[in-house]
Image (tube, rainbow, N blue to C red):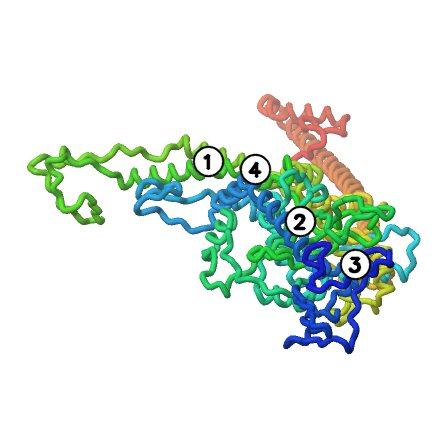
Amino acid sequence: MALTPGLSPNIRLVQPDPEFEGPGDDTTVEIIDGEDKPIANEDGKILEIEHDDGSITISLDGKSLNGDDEPKGPTGWFDNLVEDISELELNRISDELMRGISDDIDSRKDWIEDHSTGIKLLGLKIEIPGLGGSAEGAPVEGMNRVRHPLLLEAVLRFQANARSEMLPTDGPVKIRNDDNNATLDEDQLAKAFERDLNHYLTSTATEYYPDTDRMLFMLGFGGTAFKKVYFCPLRNRPVSETVDADDLIVNNNATDLQNAKRITHRSYQRPSTVKRLQILGVYRDIDLSTPNMSNLDSLQREKLSVQGIAPDSMNPNDRDREIYECNCELNIQGYEHKMRGKETGLEIPYRVTIDVSSKKVLSVVRNYNEDQQELAEARKNFVKYTYVPGMGFYDIGLLHILGNTTNAITAACRELLDAGMYANFPGFLMADTGARQNTNIFRVPPGGGALVKTGGMPISQAIMPLPYKEPSGTLMALVENMAQTGMRLGGTSEAAVGEGRSDAPVGTTLAQIEQSQKVLNSVHKRMHASQADEFQLLKEVFREHPDSFWQRNKKPAAPWDEKTFLTALDNYELIPQADPNTASQVQRLMKVMALKQLQQANPSLYDPIAIDTAALQAIGWSNPSQFLASPEAQKNPPPELIKMQADAKAAQTMSDAHMLDAQTKAKTDEAKTQIDGQKLQLEGAKVEIDKMKAQAAMKDKEIEAKDKYQDRKFKEHVQLIDLAQNIAVHPESLDVIQPLIAPAIQDLSDISNPEQPPGLAPGLIPRDQ
């Protein structure tokens, strides 16, 4: 290849035949064997030829004159083109790109400084109170340099939540098949594709999870992160790696990756890694100068300071090589864009790799597909993750949202702590008359004392403590208010859902969670879309290198070959496992609880197996079917239902027994009642009989009394007759006897009424005489 276009690399020129008028590109140089004497070097290359006429042909560019090492041109579309490009053209490309990249770095100095300050606001570096004063927020001796953890807490919460959603344990990918008429074989192939792809990202590409986890921290902090998806020639497989926003350099006018004229990935590689890539032919095999000391920006230095690492190594052999991989548009001589056989001057996409120390171009690779030669469009190699869309290329993160608030709270907290310290250990002023002391620092321990020379003055007049105030309650309330506002704005506040009630309505709880996590939900949707783009790029890389999908999988879910794998790539879409509408596990569980409540309210409208499967998946079980009974067992009543039926049957039997017992008891009580009634009737009859007997006895006694009365009266009548006879014999005794026998004579007149003796109440029996 000529060093200068139009010039031959050799001193001796072979003039073309003047009669030959073919195109210059078809002109060849022929060396006639047997007439010249070639001279080879130690590598076997012919660099000198002695001709029979005494002339000498010498190679000036180190290439063999017999054409054995002449570049044959790239065999593949994406092979390195650097060997077919002249050194002058490569130098032009290198100079042009290095100047452009330098301008791009200078255009974002303010962004670098802001992020460098943000790293300090995280408070990850241990800072003790300065003893001699410090410019880092503690200009006075003894002042503290503590930083409020508001920003750090927000970043850590975001990282933890995003990792649990975006990186599930069983793999981040699931398959979507939009064919509603898919056969059983197609469904099985989709399941095998999903399983093996998740195996690849979790077991084969072991760097994917920790690398993405680190990216999520930087995404929450700065608001912008990138993933680079490419085929790694060293690992011989597709790779998706994080690129820090600091290491992805774009031109000043870029607003997104699609319209950026120049995208430069800055990386640091070990010299051995560069050599391996040269051996593989990825990089041009040339000698590179010793790596220079890295010219680190303030953000890189701050990151190293937080880690406690020195910025650079003094030993040149231990330094990494700084490499620029620039995705740009170039018009390279020899590879000009042509339309209808004519050069158009259109700059087309290339990927150029440059060693920064030596400014040598290591590789030039086409960055567009072979079927787009007519109007080439750049391939997409990077995916941008966004926290909150910004006003330009770089987005808004928690640093921008909470940075000023964290700074203000930090200053207020320092004032409160310093006020408390100086109130407890105040400084003092001493009179100059008593200033001849051995020291002006008095540290009196508990129960101890210190000698103070006052020059005869009262000590209260010689020394006066400075009037420091106690920490302000108003300032403490202001700090609390600012912290609450920052937590709410950053989406890190604790949502008090349900107000501590276990029976809170699910709809109300969901509404409160949704309201408190709106910012997080929107960020989650953006990450879901970016991860879907990442999987699409990974899919295209697998399409170009299909055997890397199954070559490290010892137990694939399907017998993969290139045809089967490409069929799966064409038929199925790769989407993230995460749900774009659910940003946290709390939301997922609350949705499942709401679904279970709906199913319990209307059992006939829902499939209980599907709902329980979704609930188990939400809890975190990747294979819910292991807990479900077999279809045959599902047809049989569950043990709980059988037990319930047995209990119900036993309860029914016991109820029937109780009913029969109650009926028997009722009949017994009825019979007893009848018997008691009959007894009452008999007792009534007995009472009547006794009454009749009593009446009969009374009648008998009345008759007996009457008889006795009559008998007594008869006896009295007989006695009166005898008395009358005696009076008749003795008449003179009549006057004496008259008062005595008058009542008896009166009684005799009542004999005509024998029913009732005179002087007696009815029913009474007269007393026996």
The kind of secondary structure element at disc 4 is helix
3D distance between C-alphas at marks 1 and 3: 56 Å
Question: How busy is the neighbourhood of tag 1: few (under 14 within 10 Å), some, or many (20 plus)?
Answer: some
Amino acid type, residue under disc 1 in the picture = Ala
Q: Quadrant of the C terminus?
A: top right
3D distance between C-alphas at marks 2 and 1: 33 Å
Of the residues tagged 4 and 3, which is closer to the observer? 3
The circle drawn on residue 77 is: 3
Place of residue 590 in the rendered image (x, y in percent of width and height, measured from the top left) = 69, 45
On the question of residue 646 being in view, the answer is: no
Q: Quadrant of the N terminus?
A: bottom right
- Tag 1 residue: 408
3D distance between C-alphas at marks 4 and 1: 13 Å
Residue drawn at 76 percent across, 29 percent down: 754
Amino acid type, residue under disc 4 in the picture = Ile
- Tag 4 residue: 401
Residue drawn at 17 percent across, 36 percent down: 430
In front here: 132 or 585? 132
| Image: 192 above or below 666 | below
Residue drawn at 60 percent across, 49 percent down: 98
Question: How busy is the neighbourhood of tag 3: few (under 14 within 10 Å), some, or many (20 plus)?
Answer: few
Marks 4 and 3 in Cβ contact (< 8 Å): no
The residue furthest left is 456
